[in-house]
Amino acid sequence: MTDKELLAEAEKAAANSYSKYSRFRVGAALLAEDGRVFTGCNIENASYSLTNCAERTAVFKAVSEGVTSFRAIAVVGSPDGDFSRPCQPCGACLQVLSEFCGDDLMVILSNSWFKLSDFLPMRFGADNLK
Ligand code: THU
């Protein structure tokens, strides 16, 4: 699975975005250590705060199928189908990703590559609870 292919999977997932309130379509494709890809889209609700972001949809799909180790995530988002501008993961999604992914998780946004730690350098984690 190349980075380009993972981005293409994220774009495909964005086609299923249920975003009738914001009209902002987001898609994510999460590459697991075992090579499987879990995709997700944003799913909105008339009770707005119940919206689930694309990245968390992908993480929850994977974890609910017993997969908890990941290599990379590609994220795309757009109000008009033009996915060339980067769409950064929100703070809630970064925190959820950080539960399962190390600092080195690759985050792929359009033509840019980042590490999870670029966005979330000082995560709150299980160690804080000790
Ligand atoms: N959204 C995501 O799916 N992922 C993010 O990381 C940021 C925002 C969604 C939530 C909402 O449906 C729409 O984008 C506009 O905020």
Image (cartoon, rainbow, N blue to C red):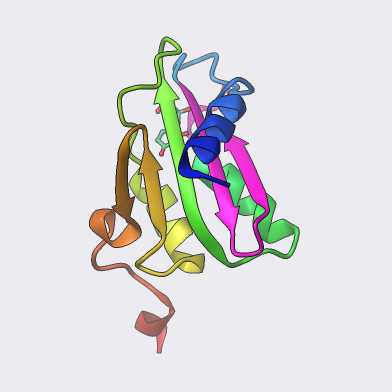
Apparent side of residue 22 relative to residue 124 in the rendered image (left or right): right
Q: Residue at x 42, y 26 (%)?
A: 77
The residue at the far front in this view is 2
Decide whether residue 43 is among the magenta residues.
Answer: yes
Decide whether residue 19 is among the magenta residues.
Answer: no
Find residue 53 and report its horizontal and vertical position in percent: 50, 38
Q: Residue at x 50, y 60 (%)?
A: 71
- Residue 32 visible? The answer is yes
On screen, 119 above or below 46?
below
Give residue 105's quadrant in the image. bottom left
Q: Residue at x 42, y 63 (%)?
A: 98
Task: Tell me the quadrant of ligand 1.
Answer: top left
Q: Residue at x 72, y 58 (%)?
A: 64
The residue at the far right in this view is 65
On screen, 15 above or below 54?
above
Q: Quadrant of the C terminus?
A: bottom left
Region in magenta: 25-50
- Residue 42 visible? The answer is no
Apparent side of residue 80 relative to residue 44 in the rendered image (left or right): left
Find residue 113 and report its horizontal and vertical position in percent: 31, 46
Find residue 78 and report its horizontal and vertical position in percent: 40, 19
Give residue 111's quadrant in the image. top left
Apparent side of residue 13 relative to residue 76 in the rendered image (left or right): right
- How many numbered circles does the render carry? 0
The residue at the far bottom in this view is 130
Apparent side of residue 12 relative to residue 101 in the rendered image (left or right): right
Find residue 84 and report its horizontal and vertical position in percent: 34, 22
